[in-house]
């Protein structure tokens, strides 16, 4: 399963001495490219494995993840549609997604 | 997430145990529930445990009460078929389509061939031996199809000693009654025998092998999802 690969990779990175954060899709509404339970792991060098979207929110998630792996508390992020036009033409990222970000300690 | 918990999660996955990671998304506290036992920052109360069991049964991760994220790590569903017969040729691909790993057991080498069962894992040892190698678990269903007591009976005896969620045996009501008598003589309890669905499948008037496969797959699904049987007048 993809989720397990993400988690196994996260442990490998930590074993190599890296700081690691995990992001998990916990809820979705409307159109969203990745289902609930999808995960992304990121380390302090910016390495990523897995995904929480089709690429639309990874940048923002990684930005938060870096602060969390440096010691900030875990955080629930919500990403929603801001552009009704994007939704009406059927873009994949027209939905809403909640992502929980935590560090691996 | 604490590394200790993640290591336990990965170990549970390797052991194909039913596992749910429960995260309080407000505090970040986590707890791992492996085969019904909780371990971690907190102990779930009865209501949360009920939600965890439902998430496992539905095989669906999600938020509970907007605060608890239940992440389900279920081992893959498996269907063990005994008998590389005509019905198996319809049932094996149907089960794969439904999301099951299919294992076909038949010691008769002329039957369980790649030509008759493309892409299906075939095991040509005797059913009792084959099934002890398969580590039957709660995500496994077993269906016997040979009509031959030499093959079906040992498979059924192995199945009723295991925690598989579904056991079905092909054969008429009369055949099934004789089968139960034989299994009783082998020491099987009434409680264990009641787990065997015989005649196998939902009663939909199935005639052809493909129709019988549909009725069996429908019944497996019904038992897996713990769905109440439909009564006349209900719509599915």
Image (cartoon, rainbow, N blue to C red):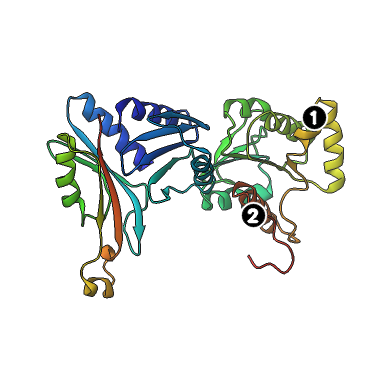
Q: To which quarter of the image does residue A92 belong?
A: bottom left
Along the line of sight, the residue nearer the viewer: B90 or A28: A28
Across and down, in percent, residue A102 comes to 25, 39
Across and down, in percent, residue A27 comes to 35, 53
Local crowd at mark 2 within 10 Å, few (<14), some, or many (≥20)? some
Q: Which residue is at 73% across, 61% downward?
A: B204
Q: Left or right? Give the position of B227 relative to A59.
A: right
Viewer-side label of 2, 1: 1
Give the label on residue B114, or none: none
The answer to whether residue A1 is visible is: yes
Q: Label 1: few (<14), some or many (≥20) within 10 Å?
A: few
Q: A63 or A77, which lies in front?
A: A77
The disc numbered 1 marks a residue on which chain?
Answer: B
- Asked if disc 2 and disc 1 are in contact, CB closer than 8 Å, the reply is no
Q: Which residue is mark 1?
A: B189
Gap in Å between the C-alphas at discs 2 and 1?
27 Å
In the picture, which quadrant includes the C terminus of chain B? bottom right
Q: Secondary structure at mark 1?
A: loop
Q: Above or below — where is A88 with respect to B123?
A: below
In the rendered image, residue A74, in percent from the top left (x then y), is placed at: 24, 40
Front residue (pair B59, B90) = B59
Q: Position of residue B125 (x, y in %)?
A: 63, 28
Q: Which structural element holds mark 2? A: helix
Badge 2 or badge 1: first in the primary sequence: 1
Q: Which residue is mark 2?
A: B218
């Amino acid at each position: 399963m993809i989720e397990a690969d993400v988690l196994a990779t996260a442990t490998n990175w930590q074993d190599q001495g890296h700081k690691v954060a995990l992001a998990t899709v916990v809820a979705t509404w409307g159109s969203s490219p990745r289902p609930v339970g999808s995960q992304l792991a990121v380390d302090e060098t910016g390495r990523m494995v897995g995904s929480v979207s089709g690429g639309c929110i990874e940048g923002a998630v990684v930005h938060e993840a870096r602060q969390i792996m440096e010691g900030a508390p875990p955080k629930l992020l919500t990403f929603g549609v801001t552009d009704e036009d994007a939704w009406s033409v059927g873009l994949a990222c027209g939905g809403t997604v909640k992502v929980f970000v935590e560090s691996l300690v | 997430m604490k590394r200790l918990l993640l290591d336990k999660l990965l170990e549970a996955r390797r052991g194909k145990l039913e596992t749910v990671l429960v995260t309080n998304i407000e505090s970040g506290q986590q707890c791992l529930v492996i085969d019904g036992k909780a371990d971690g920052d907190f102990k779930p109360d009865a209501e949360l445990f009920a939600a965890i069991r439902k998430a496992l049964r539905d095989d669906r991760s999600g938020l509970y009460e907007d605060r608890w994220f239940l992440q389900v790590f279920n081992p893959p569903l498996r269907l063990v078929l005994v008998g590389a017969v005509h019905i198996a040729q319809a049932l094996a691909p149907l089960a794969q389509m439904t999301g099951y790993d299919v294992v076909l057991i038949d010691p008769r080498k002329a039957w369980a061939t790649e030509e008759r069962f493309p892409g299906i894992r075939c095991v040509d040892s005797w059913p009792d031996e084959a099934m002890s190698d398969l580590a039957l678990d709660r995500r496994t269903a077993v269906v016997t199809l040979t009509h031959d007591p030499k093959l079906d009976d040992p498979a059924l005896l192995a199945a009723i000693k295991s925690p598989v969620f579904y056991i079905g045996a092909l054969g008429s009501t009369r055949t099934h009654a004789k089968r139960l008598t034989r299994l009783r003589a082998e020491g099987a309890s009434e409680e264990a025998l009641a787990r065997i669905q015989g005649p196998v499948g939902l009663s939909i008037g199935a005639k052809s092998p493909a129709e019988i496969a549909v009725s069996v797959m429908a019944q497996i699904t019904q038992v897996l999802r713990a769905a109440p049987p439909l009564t006349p007048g209900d719509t599915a």
